[in-house]
Amino acid sequence: MSDSPPEPENASLLPRAHTEEDAVNSPRGLYVSHFLSTWNARSFEFGSILFTVSAFPGTLLPTSLTQIIAILSVLFFSVPLGRALDRRPRFTNLRDAILVQRLSVVISCSIYFILNGSTVKGAWRLMLFGVVIVAGVFERLASKANVITMERDWVPTLFDPGHSESEDGTLRLTRVNAVMRRIDLGCKLFAPLLVSGLTSVASTLLAPGLNLLKRDSTFSGLSSDMSPEGVRISAAVIGFSALLSSFVEMRCAAIVYEQSWRLQQPKSSSAAPNTQQPRGNFFGRWKQSWTVWRTSAICLPSLSLALLYVTNLSFNGSLISYLLNSSFTLTSITLARAVSSIVELSATVVMPAGVQMMENAARRKVERATEVLNAGSSSEDAEEALLASAVSGGGVERAGLWGIWFEFFNLVPATVLLHGLATSTDNLRFLNFDLAGLPTIVQQILFFTFLACSRLGLWTFDLSISQLSQTPSIVPPSQRGEIAGIESALCSLAELIPLVIMMMAGENVNVFRWVSVGTTSLIGAGALVFTLWVRRRRGHLFHWEKLAGCGHGTALELDPR
């Protein structure tokens, strides 16, 4: 069956020089738009921390407050946001997300520019900071809307394997998802480096010459490479770059939209009655969306992904604070974080390669089964060929299974090493485990190695879940935004749990290691949940007929496909 496009309503307005193949075979516009959005989000995310610390030195309360409010905003509002994205036109969703995100960044950077001066004090200072918090909430939600629109709507619509007549449609979607995630992780690595470098250079070289404001006692606690003058310059650069890049991003998105008749088609809601305008109050609609997610095929994989975000064994503020209070140096932590980021980027290469290898193996099994049947071989040979083809396929699912267990089996020794690195005065030593007298430097290297390897499994699994959520047989296109909102809420709740526990622990930093035991156990539970889902979907986990040399129809009964 040919995939001939219907004539769009505005066909006379579309440039005929461009075809559907332009957008699919050369998705540079899609990548550029996604890069600009992610880069601005990551730059502002890191820059806002520096700007807040500079505006309110000597206390961590403003920084903690903004982070907690941002997480809570995603927790409560990502669900109705996803539902709204399912009902609105595709280009309208992306355009509005870009405009709200950039406007929020410009407003926040402008206020940060003022707050890091010496003219605003007292109640006016707190009021301006309140505006920054509100703008930060809008920026976080707009960034989330941009990601959902791109990853759950535009990409699967353009690169849906069902629209491709070639055999590598699934692999093409996998490669596009990998590039999109590579952009995310690259911006996560390099944007903070650029912002911190810009602030440092502006503080030491540019600001003294420009003499933007006079120093006073308010900023006496700041280091020389983060002066208020340098912070103001950095805030101005981020604000202007966000404003200017918005035009480029919208133009790139418009070109991709104009080249694709699939993106221009209205969204169909006939397959999902729940996407109609819901009745009831905010909490009633919120509960309805959770019911949709709970009854969907992606429920268990989404739950597994959320459990992975509970961990405190990632290079966040709590882990870095704990390591600095232990025997770790800042240099070793910085180097380990850089290596971990490189390992995370490698997941965007490993996962597509693994999927391609498994899909090619499955294709060869199917071809062999077809040849055996066409050759009229004996019944035993034909049954063996059918057996091999029936248990094949599912490369994305199997890649996710390998990824989540790989993360768990690396976090277990990392957790043990974390307890073994306890100080001699610590009474909570894990089973009095001293790692057989290994030197401290060896223990640290082993800990960072296992921690970095776990990130490879995390992002391999994350990529697998993203592609499963793009599969129409698992998540209907009319429900992608709503379910993506549920997943964002779950991940935000998971991130909040260890933060709240550590806040309740107060100055007892040793609680961190016991929290790591609990979070690692939850990741193991997530691996079991996803394994159960794969077993239920594929009908099997292991090819016992290959190991035992038997089967005789058993695997065919286990795998209904």
Image (spheres, helix red, strand yellow):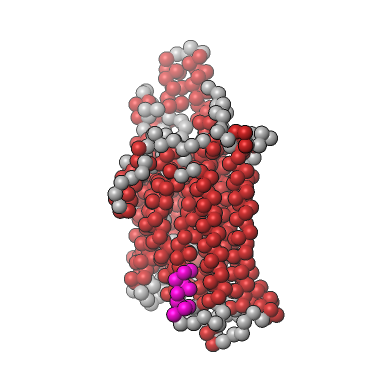
The spot of residue 189 in percent (x, y) is: 57, 59
Looking at the image, can residue 357 be seen? no
Please state the horizontal and vertical placement of residue 550, each as a whole percent of the image.
Answer: 38, 26
| Of residues 261 and 372, the one drawn nearer to the viewer in this rendering | 261
- The region drawn magenta spans 123-132
Using the image as rendered, state which of residue 358 and residue 147 is in the foreground: 147
- The residue drawn where x is 34% and y is 72% is 505
> x, y (%) of residue 481?
43, 45
337 sits to left or right of 205: left
Question: Is 247 inside the magenta-drawn segment?
Answer: no
504 relative position to 172: left or right: left
Vertical position of residue 490 compared to residue 480: above or below: below
Q: Is residue 265 above or below residue 119?
A: above
User: Residue at point 41% right, 53% down?
Assistant: 78
Q: Quadrant of residue 491?
A: bottom left
Task: From this view, report whether residue 185 is shown above or below residue 208.
Answer: above
- Residue 278 in sight: yes
The secondary structure that most of the magenta stretch takes on is helix
The single residue placed furthest to the bottom in the displayed view is 217
Residue 261, image x, y percentages: 57, 35
- Taking the spot 42% from the left edge, 70% from the top edge, the residue there is 65
Query: Residue 12 or 250: which is nearer the viewer?
Result: 12
Residue drawn where x is 62% and y is 75% of the image: 230
Label total for image: 0
| Residue 220 in the image: above or below residue 243 | below
Magenta run includes residue 126:
yes
Quarter of the image with the C terminus in it: top left
